[in-house]
Image (cartoon, grey):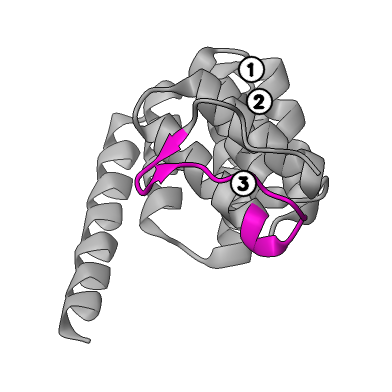
């Protein structure tokens, strides 16, 4: 079975070698990739996400993370490819759809970005993240007033969510 990419370190130390494929192993690879990406170590992050896909080829989280990573690098075609595949297998399609909207927006495909956000709202309702992406799209489309309204709504929803989480 595959081993973790050499030289990769997680919060807890060196990533152990995996001797069998389990959901836990795939989750550990994805978590290690997310930690590496957050630390700006994109090559390591990519290696972890690709290794996760070798073990679980239909893992929507690994595909989504690779899409985000490719978008971060400016490789919009690869980003879109990973994100479209992720949308088919993701347990949380709204997040993937928001990421697809950001890629479409970066490619000046504003109609596609709008449609992805519409589908995200149908999937998850109005969330702070969806509203923030809608605000960004409204700005690009020259609608500063609507962008401000959407950002305010996003902030209010986020604060309400924080208050609920803090009170539980």
State the SS at label 3.
helix
Q: CA distance from mark 3 to mark 2?
A: 11 Å
Q: Is residue 32 left or right of residue 165?
A: right
Q: Quadrant of the N terminus?
A: top right
Q: Write down the residue under mark 2.
A: 79
Q: Is residue 54 left or right of residue 110?
A: right
Q: 142 or 130: nearer the eye?
A: 130
Give yes or no for contact between labels 1 and 2 (Cβ–Cβ under 8 Å).
Answer: yes
Could you tell me residue 18's position as x and y percent? 68, 49
Q: Write down the residue under mark 1.
A: 76
Asked if the stretch drawn in magenta spans residue 12, the answer is yes
Where are the magenta residues, as a range?
Answer: 9-25
State the SS at label 1.
helix
Q: 80 or 47: nearer the eye?
A: 47
Q: CA distance from mark 1 to mark 3?
A: 14 Å
Could you tell me residue 150's position as x and y percent? 33, 48
In the displayed structure, 134 sits above or below 165; it is: above
Residue at 37%, 23% in the rendered image: 40
Give yes or no for contact between labels 1 and 3 (Cβ–Cβ under 8 Å).
Answer: no
Q: Is residue 21 left or right of residue 130?
A: right
Could you tell me residue 114's position as x and y percent? 59, 39
Q: Residues within 10 Å of mark 1 (few under 14, many from 20)?
A: many
In the displayed structure, 137 sits above or below 142; it is: below
Q: 52 or 9: nearer the eye?
A: 9
Picture quadrant where residue 81 is located: top right
Could you tell me residue 9's position as x and y percent? 43, 35
Q: Is residue 33 left or right of residue 92?
A: left
Q: Write down the residue under mark 3.
A: 96
Q: Quadrant of the C terminus?
A: bottom left
Point out the tag, 1 or 3, that comes first from the N-terminus: 1
């Amino acid at each position: 079975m595959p081993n973790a990419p050499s030289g990769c370190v997680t919060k807890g130390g060196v990533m152990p070698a995996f001797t069998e494929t389990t959901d836990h192993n795939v989750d550990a690879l994805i978590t290690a990739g997310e930690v590496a990406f957050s630390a700006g170590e994109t090559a390591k992050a990519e290696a972890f996400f690709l290794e996760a896909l070798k073990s679980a080829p239909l893992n929507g989280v690994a595909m989504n993370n690779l899409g985000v990573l490719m978008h971060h690098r400016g490789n919009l075609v690869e980003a879109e490819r990973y994100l479209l595949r992720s949308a088919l297998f993701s347990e949380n399609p709204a997040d993937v759809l928001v990421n697809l909207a950001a890629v479409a927006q970066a490619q000046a495909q504003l109609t596609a970005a709008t449609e992805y956000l519409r589908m995200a709202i149908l999937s998850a309702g109005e969330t702070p993240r969806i509203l923030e992406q809608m605000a960004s799209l409204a700005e690009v489309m020259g609608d500063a007033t609507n962008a401000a309204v959407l950002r305010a709504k996003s902030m209010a929803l986020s604060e309400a969510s924080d208050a609920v989480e803090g009170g539980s």
